[in-house]
Amino acid sequence: MGNLYTNIVLKGPGRAKVCELLGHLGRGACVAPTVNGYTVVFDRACEDQDKATQYKVSKTLSRSLKCTAITFLNHDDDVLWYCLYDAGKRIDEYDSNPEFGDFIFFHLLNLRPRTRPPGPPSGGDASKMCKAFDVLDSTDVVESVLRRPGGRDGYLTAYLRHKDLATALRLPACTVGFGYTSLNKTEQPEWFFRAGELDPAQLIWVGR
């Protein structure tokens, strides 16, 4: 069993403003401290791995806060998917393994699809990504991360692809490997939080 997590990274708005909006929307979420202008939201409903929910939540946050928002989904380390918004407008989308199929079906039924080689990634515009996050000097690196195949000849896990992408875009470490479900567990080892540069005492829970 690989990683299963979702989260949304917001560029610009501070945590207090983000939490106020989440409360107004009646959402259940965990919010990390704002670091270098980025606030990471771990939405409870998004953990169902339904892209429709992530479209809706990230679009609403981006539009309401008039900011850039990128929502990530890692499905069992087989797929890394993201969708990028600017002031509520979807400007980029990516799927590292579109041949995987409808992973929400397998997730809800607790099944795995038939094993097959990963297909080539689809979507993803490195120039748009780097412009959105003010890291134009990372365009070539981001392009390489997006296009590298999965499997034995490339990224063995979606987690590793996500880690390289977040590093190139200079996003908070806690966007890699963390979701509402894992953060909501009553007991986690210290190394778990250190990996994402998180202090559990500083997390804010909304609608818990």
Image (spheres, rainbow, N blue to C red):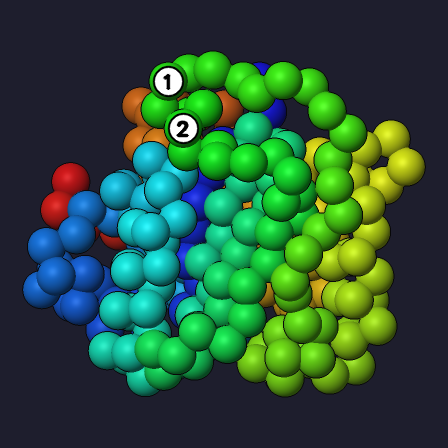
Q: Residue at x 32, y 68 (%)?
A: 59
Q: Residue at x 41, y 33 (%)?
A: 104
Choose top left, top right, bottom left or bottom right for residue 132: bottom right
How far, Cα to Cα, is label 1 from label 2? 6 Å
Task: Specify the amino acid type for callout 1.
Answer: Leu
Q: Position of residue 122 (x, y in %)?
A: 67, 56
Residue under circle 1?
109
Residue under circle 2?
105
Marks counted in the figure total: 2
Q: In the image, is residue 146 above or below residue 1?
A: below
Q: Position of residue 207 (x, y in %)?
A: 13, 46
Does 40 sit left or right of 81 as displayed? left
- Find numbered disc 2 in the image and state the secondary structure of the residue it sits on: helix
Q: Residues within 10 Å of mark 1 (few under 14, many from 20)?
A: few
Residue 175 visible in this rendered orientation of the protein: no
Q: Residue at x 36, y 42 (%)?
A: 50
Task: Specify the amino acid type for callout 2.
Answer: Phe
Choose top left, top right, bottom left or bottom right for residue 179: top left
Q: Residue at x 78, y 76 (%)?
A: 139
